[in-house]
Image (cartoon, rainbow, N blue to C red):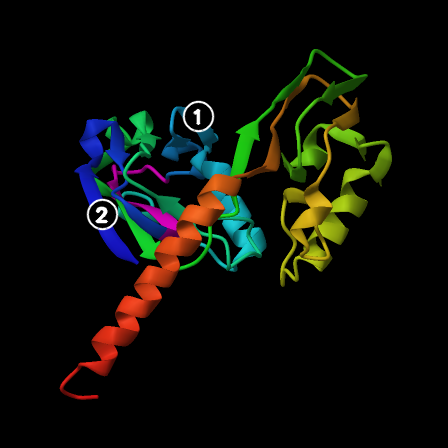
């Protein structure tokens, strides 16, 4: 990882345009000192936006990113101490969580920025000092698609069954925070194929198993690409039916693929140029 930009936590927000290059992952790190008697939670770390040429491909709370990092990548940094130094990291892979081949290739004509909002951390009653930083991991490869994650909360006024349908292309995952607190049954249908029809505890148990977690997790990740073949994400409609046990807001997220054929060609050429350049430098190195 390489540091790209940092701001004091007192700023309350950060907008940073990523420089031209090829990226494999991004990291947003919050390193703060909590105020006396205060223990921060993930909810205090605000919102994350990754905008690609005018479109938000990521627009979710930092909480869900840190949770998903724990589901897909292992233990993501989350160290909170009352009135003391505290750290949290959010990692975004430049592609599906399992796909280490896809990259994000930012060219001359692209405008790609990160916008982090963390107003709770700028409140002196919560945090006395600290920094928020953006890091990146460079990687040579091909940009075949963008990985989008958007929030689609579901609000229930009481015990009821709520259902809806979204015309979203190429949904790869559905994420739900703490489903057992509000739901007694979950049904998810993708392009007329039932992907889930069970109570939350069953689905959480399977999610923990399929993602090889060592301890149970309260975040449900329903994957439609279990074969790790990105073509499994292809589709056009996602439907849900949730049985609510009471009033509340269900935090639901859709993860989907947006193919970028023109970028695939551009990034392939750039990657080959870099590979050849590296070979030439190695060949003419005095230590070769």
**Which residue has dot 2 on it?**
4
Q: Is residue 8 above or below residue 21?
A: above
Q: Which residue is mark 1?
A: 55
Q: CA distance from mark 2 to mark 1?
A: 22 Å
Task: Kindly report which numbered mark, 2 or 1, lies closer to the viewer in this rendering.
Answer: 1
Is residue 11 placed above or below 210 in the rendered structure? above
Query: 10 Å neighbourhood of mark 1: few (<14), some, or many (≥20)?
Result: few
**Residue 126 horizontal/vertical position (percent):** 29, 31
Q: Is 91 positioned to the left or the right of 221 in the image?
A: left
Front residue (pair 216, 37): 216
Is 25 magenta? The answer is yes
The spot of residue 68 in percent (x, y) is 54, 46
Residue 16, image quadrant: top left
Give the percent coordinates (x, y) of residue 178: 64, 37
Question: Are there few (<14), some (14-19), or many (20+) residues within 10 Å of tag 2?
Answer: some
Q: Which residues are magenta?
A: 23-39
Mark 1 lies on a secondary structure that is: strand
Residue at point 38%, 62% (across, down): 272
| Quadrant of the image containing the N terminus | bottom left
């Amino acid at each position: 990882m390489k540091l790209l930009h940092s701001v004091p936590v007192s700023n309350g927000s950060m907008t940073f345009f990523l420089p031209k290059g090829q990226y494999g992952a991004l990291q947003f790190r919050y390193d703060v000192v909590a105020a006396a008697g205060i223990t921060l939670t993930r909810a205090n770390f605000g919102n994350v936006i990754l905008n690609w040429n005018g479109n938000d491909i990521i627009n979710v709370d930092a909480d869900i990113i840190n949770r998903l990092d724990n589901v897909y990548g292992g233990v993501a940094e989350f160290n909170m101490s009352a009135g003391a130094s505290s750290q949290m990291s959010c990692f975004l892979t430049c592609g599906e969580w399992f796909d280490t081949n896809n990259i994000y290739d930012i060219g001359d004509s692209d405008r790609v920025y990160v916008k982090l909002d963390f107003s709770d951390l700028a409140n002196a009653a919560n945090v006395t000092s600290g920094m928020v930083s953006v890091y990146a991991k460079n990687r040579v490869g091909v940009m075949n698609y963008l990985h989008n994650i958007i929030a689609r909360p579901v609000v229930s006024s009481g015990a009821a069954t709520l259902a809806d349908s979204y015309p979203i292309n190429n949904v790869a995952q559905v994420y739900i925070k703490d489903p057992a607190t509000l739901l007694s049954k979950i049904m998810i249908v993708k392009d007329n194929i039932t992907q889930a029809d069970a109570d939350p505890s069953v689905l959480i148990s399977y999610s923990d198993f399929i993602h090889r977690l060592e301890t149970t997790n309260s975040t449900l990740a329903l994957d439609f690409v279990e074969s790790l073949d990105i073509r499994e994400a292809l589709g056009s409609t996602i439907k849900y039916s949730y049985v609510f046990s009471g009033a509340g807001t269900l935090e639901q997220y859709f993860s989907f693929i947006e193919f970028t054929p023109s970028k695939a060609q551009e990034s392939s050429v750039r990657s080959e140029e870099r590979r050849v350049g590296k070979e030439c430098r190695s060949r003419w190195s005095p230590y070769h």
